Amino acid sequence: MVLLSSARVAIAQQLPDIDVLHYRFELSLEDSTDSIEGNATVRFKSLAPVNRITLNLTSPDAGKGMRVSAVKLNNQVINYQQMDNKLVMNLSKTLKVGDIAEINVLYAGIPTGGLIISKSKFGQRTFFGDNWPNRAQNWLPCVDEPRDKASVEFLVKAPEHYKVISNGILQEESHLANNRKLTYWKEDVVLPTKVMVIGVADFDVQLSGTVSGIPVSSWVYPENRKEGFYDYGVGPGILSYFIKTVGPYGYKKLAHVQSKTTYGGLENAGAIFYAERSVTGTRSSESTVAHETAHQWFGDMATETEFAHLWLSEGFATYMSALYMESRYGHDTLVSTLKKDRLRVINFYKSYQQPVVDTYATDYMKLLNANSYQKGAWVLHMLRIKLGNDMFYKSVRKYYATFAGKNANTDDLRKVVERVSGENLQSFFQQWLYTAGHPDLDVTWTYIPGKKTVQITVAQKQAHVFLFPLEVQWKSTAAGKEVISRFNITKKKQVFTFSAGSKPVGMILDPNTNLLFEGSIHEAQ
């Protein structure tokens, strides 16, 4: 990955002109062509006086893209232009602040992305939405940004042999003429476009269980139905864990879906898509199912205001899934995960020296990195150690309750945790999330026999000085037991002294895996 210059200018966030309230997408799919037909209705509220509305929609190019054939505002035909992957509509009159209106767009074309029209690994034709981060515009006219959340309906007409999964609750499934079928799903909870979705395939479907009145189902290819139903059968237990740990589930159903997503898993609201390879019959993807289920709270319901704060989605999902796996398989599982993730963060920093909150990145795909996932998770782990379990979980539940159905940024999280805990966390958030890097330590120790003391020198090799507690474990041969000494590191170089009846052995840094750092400890020569 290319290093990004510190001299770059942060992306300016423009204030929106409209707030989309609801989408209704009517889609027609065929087996004989990859071209789709769409009829989109977008209900919105004006946030400023406007006489021009712009939606994201990929322009036609080289036989692909969406070509618009008609646009109406409140049932009146209006002029429009397609350019630079935008649909620009000129209004016949200026809308006032607070006005609510509807735009209707008729369009057709072959998606350049966002909707994957392909074949399963068994050779069967499939259609799968794959919108993250801002690829919904490749097949849906929309405001393709996480800050603009809206409720959504999908009405899909397709050959009769297909089953269709989507967000929300099934409203209708009707047979049409010419061996076709209409499937209608409706989601009343507002969503960002990145997790609005349809999946169309020859599915086998099983109800895995019901948790707090929420049906949990598995949608898999018929050819591996036995393995898929077994693998995705972990879903109810995972949902139950997060309801108890975080708070009420925000949607009315949860479907786990085998798909053609380009990711290992994609957290579409109420209808999670997993890569085909997730079905093995061994439940080897349990942590992935936990990760994507955690996203239903963090990323879907409580959504980052912009992708610079992606760690609020990916860091939370990474850490919460690790906590779930700890609850299932013991504390050693969490420790092993943290150690592997710490190594990934250290190695990633060698080639990408940017902070977790990266306001300069314009290629959002590059934010799918160890900063957003593993370092974000490590920040939450260190916050838990700092606050203690009770205060940490209380803060997480309060953050979710405050921003469920809304958008939040990193500072919003900090303020919630500060109110709950009573602690000032400005420096903690600044150094771990807004500052690149981590402590790189060179720690030496010397035993002074005459004084029966140990002198430890802690040097930070990186440019920025971090503030953190450091634990050192050592074995006292005199007492015959392991001892942990704790030091508060606040300077570039510090010297600490503590008593020891004899020369210690087996000096270990961070024995409890509580600190994101690199470095070693050794006896001074």
Image (spheres, rainbow, N blue to C red):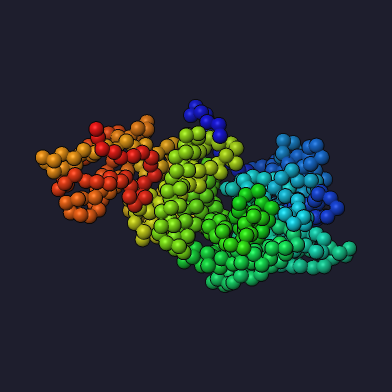
What percent of the width, then of the height, locates residue 329?
A: 45, 62
Q: Quadrant of residue 421?
A: bottom left
Q: Position of residue 254 (x, y in %)?
A: 61, 64
Quadrant position of residue 16: top right
Residue 391 in the image, given as x and y percentages of width and height: 36, 58
Position of the C terminus, as image quadrant, is top left
Task: Let me know if residue 189 appears in the view.
Answer: yes
Q: Could you tell me which residue is drawn at 74 percent across and 68 percent down?
A: 172
Nearer to us in this view, 204 or 382? 204
What is the residue that sits farthest to the top in this orientation?
7
User: What residue is drawn where x is 44% and y is 40%?
Assistant: 346
Residue extending furthest right? 178
Give the image location of residue 107, x and y in percent: 80, 48
**Which residue is farthest left?**
450
Residue at (27%, 34%) from the top-left corner? 493
Residue nearest the viewer, comparing 368 with 99: 368
| Side of 491 where 408 appears, left or right | right
Name the quarter where the N terminus is drawn: top right
In the depicted view, which residue is nearer to us: 46 or 86? 86
Does any portion of residue 11 appear in the rendered image?
no
Above or below, 175 against 421 in this view is: below
Count numbered badges in the picture: 0
Q: Nearer the viewer, residue 184 or 181?
A: 181
Q: Residue at x 73, y 48 (%)?
A: 139
The image quarter in which residue 455 lies: top left
